[in-house]
Image (tube, grey):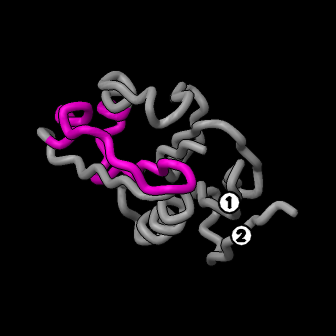
Amino acid sequence: MEKCLKLHLANLGDTKMFTAHGADHVMVNRVRYDHAIVVNAQEVREDWHVADFGALNESHFNYFLPFKPDVILIGTGTQQRFAHPRLYRALTDLGIGVEFMDTPAACRTYNILVAEDRKVIAAIML
């Protein structure tokens, strides 16, 4: 039986929020995704092509530079993993926080920060 956690938060209009997550998917505003996505308050992007954590390279992190977020939450799947700081140095040099956490924690943390009107991005790997 598939285990899925549904998240319930106050309605924030069209703001993109995680509404559920499981081992093989996440849901944003009740739409299911079973591949890597990038979420901010305005949109869900499916053009961050990361096959798995081991495939991360500098270009995957440079993808976020045009967004100019305050913080990026990297959901690393079912377990928390950390990328080498040289991969995301361009972000930290600009004062952008980069946090690595398992995907469920990234979803929960994103929802809290976006509800506080913070400029946050969640980059989710499954």
Q: Is residue 8 left or right of residue 122?
A: right
Kindly identify the residue that appears in the image at 25 percent across and 38 percent down: 84
Badge 1 vs badge 2, beta-carbon distance below 8 Å = yes
Q: Nearer the viewer, residue 2 or 72?
A: 2
Kindly identify the residue that appears in the image at 56 percent across and 26 percent down: 47
Q: Compared to 100, does 55 lie above or below?
A: above
Residue wearing tag 1: 21
- Segment colored magenta: 64-92
| Badge 1 amino acid | His
| Badge 2 amino acid | Leu
Residue 66 in percent (x, y) is at 33, 30
Extreme residue toward the right, this view: 1
Element type at marker 1?
strand
Residue 67 in percent (x, y) is at 36, 37
Kindly identify the residue that appears in the image at 82 percent across and 61 percent down: 2
Residue 35 in percent (x, y) is at 66, 37
Q: Quadrant of the N terminus?
A: bottom right
Kindly identify the residue that appears in the image at 18 percent across and 33 percent down: 86
Q: Quadrant of residue 46?
A: top right
Q: Is residue 84 left or right of residue 113?
A: left
Q: Is residue 21 left or right of residue 104?
A: right
Residue wearing tag 2: 5
Which of the two discs, 1 and 2, labels the residue nearer the N terminus?
2
Q: Is residue 84 left or right of residue 109?
A: left
Distance from Cα at disc 1 to Cα at disc 2: 5 Å
Extreme residue toward the left, this view: 93
